[in-house]
Amino acid sequence: MSNSSITVTVKLFAAFGEAYGVSFVTVELPPETPVSQVLENSIAQYPQLEQWRTRTRFGVNLEFVSPDTILQDGDEVVLIPPVSGG
């Protein structure tokens, strides 16, 4: 059994950037990881993000994707919470 991993860059906006204190992080994940796991990992690390669990959309490589989209090595992930502006 292989213990390989994939590396993805996670861009952090709004509440996610505030929680992490940076604009992006690079994370290692097991192969066959769905993009939704990135959100789960974020909530586990920063519980104040729980309020965004059901309202966050996902982007991979500049395209909106479903939560069950499987990540590939080198992907760029964006967690997109609801935003308002004016």
Image (cartoon, grey):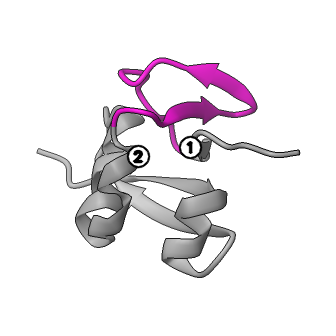
Q: Nearer the viewer, residue 66 or 30?
A: 66
86 displayed left or right of 12: right
Q: Which label is found at residue 30?
A: none
Q: Position of residue 72 (x, y in %)?
A: 50, 35
Task: Identify which residue is drawn at 40% across, 46% down.
Answer: 52
Look at label 1 and name its amino acid: Pro
Task: Identify which residue is drawn at 58% across, 81% down.
Answer: 21
6 displayed left or right of 17: left
Q: Is residue 51 above or below residue 82?
A: below
Question: Which residue is the site of mark 1?
Answer: 81
Instruction: Specify the quadrant of the image occupied by residue 34.
Output: top left
Q: Quadrant of the C terminus?
A: top right
Q: Residue furthest right?
A: 86
Q: Residue furthest front?
A: 86
Where are the magenta residues, as a range? 54-73
Tag 1, which secondary structure? loop
Question: Which residue is the site of mark 2?
Answer: 52
Q: Nearer the viewer, residue 81 or 9?
A: 81
- Per the picture, the main secondary structure of the magenta-coloured stretch is loop
- State yes or no: residue 7 in magenta: no
Task: Identify which residue is drawn at 66% across, 57% down.
Answer: 13
| Lower position in the chain sequence, tag 2 or tag 1 | 2
Q: Residues within 10 Å of mark 1 (few under 14, many from 20)?
A: many
Look at label 2 and name its amino acid: Trp
Task: Identify which residue is drawn at 72% across, 43% down.
Answer: 84
| Residues under numbered marks 2 and 1 in contact, where contact means CB atoms less than 8 Å apart | yes
